[in-house]
């Protein structure tokens, strides 16, 4: 096999620029089919993006003999079901983050894929972006010494679209498994897992103080990595001022960065300050997609799989105070 032919289940907003074109532009990769329950929208997407086939039925796409692997880009409430269907069909699958509604669902997905000998990947794409690989390289090289502590926080004002939560699934726990914390915080937590290894303990508190929707709008907690490094986190989606900063502190310095934009990294080491600018690519999923394609073609290894994705879901469950 010289090329991986992809099908997408759920060709919504995230697939327009962030991910979809990456399947067409990655080396050894093709996008050959898309599916959406609204057939007219699927047909429109296929026409605009030059995709040969479209479906309004997920099983039909999965059964397509010309589809080698499937990307599930639907809300979390359907992730487990679609992954299990792909596993039963023997097709590798990339699932959007968060991996599932809960850690327990992640375990079921991993079990099914292992039993079927089907590779499972999770779309935590920061593990492959040059900007974040630079952060990992700085830590791995000892640029800030031995890591001691991590602080991560994301604060943001409410969005106007939250006034009608029926139109916005990310704050509907029945579809998303929670609110913005579940939707967004995994990016930081998963990246910290990538840089510093698994988190062994975590605990926290979740609340709804703004009352704009049913899901949590504030979460705070602490965690400890298996290495002994300790961390704290704060996430609030109902305050006036926006803040986005994660800081990894070491014995000789620190590195600070934003999780949700590509502003310059700030490296503080040995009394010196350095600003490092690395822009994100247009299609931010494409580098991760390339690692998946390379893995499936026997030429590499993807850094984001079902095991790492499940660990991140476990941490979020703990910080939410879930059993």
Image (cartoon, rainbow, N blue to C red):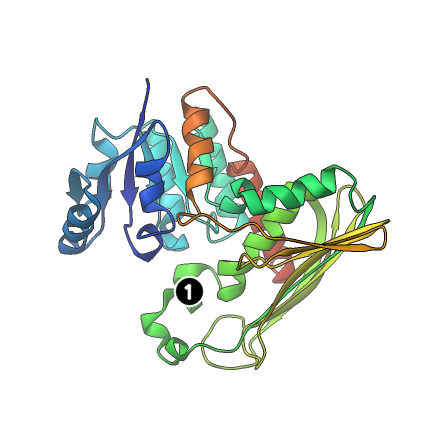
Left/right placement of residue 47 relative to residue 11 reads left
Which residue is drawn at the image coordinates 50% and 65% (left, top)?
180
Answer yes or no: is residue 198 visible.
no
The C terminus is located in which quarter?
bottom right
In the image, 58 versus 142, the foreground residue is 142
Which residue matches tag 1?
170
Left/right placement of residue 90 relative to residue 176 reads left
Task: Using the image, determine if residue 217 lies above or below residue 75.
Answer: below
Task: Using the image, determine if residue 168 lies above or below residue 288.
Answer: below
Which residue is drawn at the image coordinates 47% and 32% (left, top)?
291
Q: Secondary structure at mark 1?
A: helix
Which residue is drawn at the image coordinates 64% and 60% (left, top)?
319
Q: Which quarter of the picture shows residue 196?
A: top right
Left/right placement of residue 216 relative to residue 151 reads left
The N terminus is located in which quarter?
top left
Answer yes or no: is residue 263 visible.
yes
In the image, 144 versus 238, the foreground residue is 144
Task: Using the image, determine if residue 180 lies above or below residue 268.
Answer: below
**Residue 238 place in picture, x, y as percent:** 54, 78
**Residue 116 place in picture, x, y as percent:** 41, 26
In the image, 154 versus 198, the foreground residue is 154
**Residue 118 place in picture, x, y as percent:** 41, 27
Using a 10 Å C-alpha cutoff, classify the residue at mark 1 as few (fewer than 14 neighbours), some (14 to 19) or many (20 or more): many
Q: Please give the count of numbered marks on the rendered protein.
A: 1
């Amino acid at each position: 096999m010289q090329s991986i032919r992809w099908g997408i289940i759920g060709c919504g907003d995230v697939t327009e620029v962030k991910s979809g074109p990456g399947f067409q532009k990655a080396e050894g990769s093709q996008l050959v089919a898309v599916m959406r329950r609204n057939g007219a929208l699927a047909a429109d997407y296929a026409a605009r993006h030059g995709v040969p086939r479209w479906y309004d039925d997920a099983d039909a796409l999965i059964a397509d003999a010309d589809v080698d692997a499937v990307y599930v880009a639907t809300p979390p409430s359907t992730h487990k079901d679609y992954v299990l269907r792909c596993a039963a069909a023997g097709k590798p699958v990339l699932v959007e983050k968060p991996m599932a509604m809960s850690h327990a669902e992640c375990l079921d997905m991993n079990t099914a894929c292992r039993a079927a000998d089907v590779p499972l990947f999770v779309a935590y794409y920061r593990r492959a972006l040059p900007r974040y690989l630079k952060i990992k390289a700085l830590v791995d090289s000892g640029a800030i010494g031995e890591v001691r502590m991590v602080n991560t926080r994301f604060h943001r004002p409410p969005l106007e679209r939250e006034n009608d939560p029926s139109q916005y699934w990310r704050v509907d726990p029945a579809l998303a498994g929670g609110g913005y914390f579940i939707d967004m915080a995994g990016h930081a937590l998963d990246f910290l897992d990538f840089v510093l290894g698994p988190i062994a303990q975590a605990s926290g508190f979740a609340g709804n103080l703004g009352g704009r929707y049913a899901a949590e709008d504030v979460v705070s907690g602490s965690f400890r990595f298996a290495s002994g490094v300790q961390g704290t986190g704060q996430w609030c989606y109902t305050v006036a001022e926006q803040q986005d900063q994660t800081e990894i502190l070491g014995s000789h310095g620190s590195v600070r960065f934003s999780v949700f934009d590509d502003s310059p990294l700030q490296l503080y080491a040995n009394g010196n300050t350095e600003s490092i600018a690395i822009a994100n690519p247009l299609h931010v999923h494409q580098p991760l997609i390339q690692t998946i394609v390379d893995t499936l073609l026997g030429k590499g290894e993807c850094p984001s799989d079902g095991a790492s994705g499940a660990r991140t879901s476990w941490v979020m469950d703990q910080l939410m105070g879930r059993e």
